[in-house]
Amino acid sequence: MSTARAPIGVIGTGYVGLVTAAGFAALGSDVYCVDIDAEKVERLRRGEVPIYEPGLEALLAEHAERLHFSTDLADALQHASLLFVAVGTPPTYSGDADLTAVHAVADAIPASKDHALVMKSTVPCGTGASLRRIFNEQGKAELAYVSCPEFLKEGSAVADFMNPDRVVVGDTGDWAGDAVVELYSPLDAPLVRTDVASAEMVKLASNAFLATKISFINEIANVCEETGADVVEVARGMGLDARIGQKFLQAGIGFGGSCFPKDVDALKQLAGNSGYHFQLLNSVIEVNDLQKRRVIGKLQKHLGGLVGKRVALLGLAFKPDTDDMREASSLVLSARLHADGALVSAYDPIAEEQARKLVSGITFASSAIEAVRGADAVVLVTEWRELVDLDYSEVAAAMDGELLIDGRNALDPEAIRAAGLTYEGIGRR
Ligand code: UGA
């Protein structure tokens, strides 16, 4: 791979920042990473990766000589023109995105005609325009600005970086937009070059649409339960229509993670702040909240009252192949079970450490079989391969009861019944 590629700066070393840094280093750029967390920077310098993301540690190690970590913006400013911003934009109590970290970066950038901020963080539509006003007020009018939203998925982030469905570059048609396009050119992805506001909206609208698709199929699943249809068959039949597509039609116990819940809310608030009531998104959020609780009703249907009942949760992370617990369905489920007097045990292949910080009143087991021992019911919460591939006869033998709730429709009902368990999925016959 060419080593003559432009060096870049990456501000913020979370999921998006680290994957962006590793990806561009792999493509041949020197990457100057900046983070305000000194301990994190130290760990990264030692080659330790503070998050679990398949393939990331290996990629960072492979290109270590091109990756530089610092708490000081000066290194990045000295070596690179393009400064990718990948800081957190968590939700506030109002549901709007908290742009404190973005503004701190904007304030820290000095006046320069040779530098550009390239926004990777998910920000409300209008952020680029408001930063432009701030730069003008601060005497930094020559600073360039590009919106370049990130579409990677946790758990497959490295592969997503290398094979993007599209690259979106929003700018004013100046040198900075050209430079970002050039940087992504080896990936040979479809390019959408547009204005800043439209690029910002592509990101929010994409996440909101995917979340809508999930809430839609979850409601279909709930209706299937009333009508005797099987949502897996229904989704297969729907998805073969190329206009609908097979992806994101997997019914389950709701979406979580750091993006969908936050971005759907942020788009709803953004619309509301400008006087538009985005009715559909209210429903998407409400359906998802209720979906996370439906397992309780299924447990009660089979077990009666839950006081003193032993319930094992298999998987805790918001989805497989990540240790991310943000907005995970397991948080709502475990809290509800605990409140109803159930005795909850849980096992997750990777996310236990993160889960311990957020969940109380449950026992953590060191294996799936240990978690299900003596259980009256087992709930598959996260479809980790390891959990889908369990020997369910062994699970049945270890349990006291025989109820298995497949919260992700990831198991074969016939195989589970053959193992001696009562199978209950989401919207399945
Ligand atoms: C999501 C988007 O998919 C990415 O394109 C985007 O870049 C990212 O948010 C972001 O904004 O940073 P991610 O949160 O990593 O990525 O996770 P997804 O794989 O999209 O899954 C989100 C949730 O939806 C999970 O809880 C998953 O279990 C659930 N889901 C997904 C379903 O319930 N059904 C499905 O069919 C698909």
Image (spheres, rainbow, N blue to C red):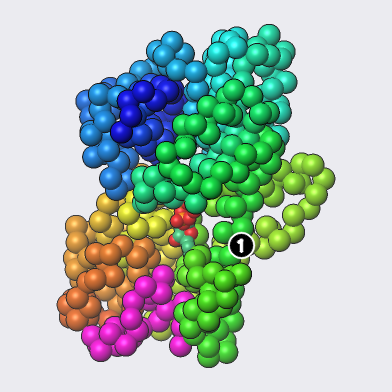
Type of amino acid under label 1:
Thr
Disc 1: CA contacts within 10 A as few (<14), some (14-19) or many (>=20): many
Q: Position of residue 97 (x, y in %)?
A: 61, 38
| Residue 324 seen from this side | no
Q: Is residue 156 left or right of residue 219?
A: left
Q: Is 21 included in the stretch rendered in magenta?
A: no
Image height of 327 relative to 93, above or below = below
Task: Residue at 28% x, 27% y: name it.
Answer: 44
Q: Position of residue 118 (x, y in %)?
A: 55, 28
> Range of the magenta residues?
405-429
- Which quadrant: the N terminus? top left
Q: Is 427 included in the stretch rendered in magenta?
A: yes
| Residue 183 seen from this side | yes
> Which SS class for mark 1?
helix
Of 15 and 37, nearer the camera is: 15
The residue tagged 1 is 212
Q: Position of residue 106 (x, y in %)?
A: 58, 20
Of 260 and 333, nearer the camera is: 260
Task: Residue at 71% x, 28% y: name it.
Answer: 129
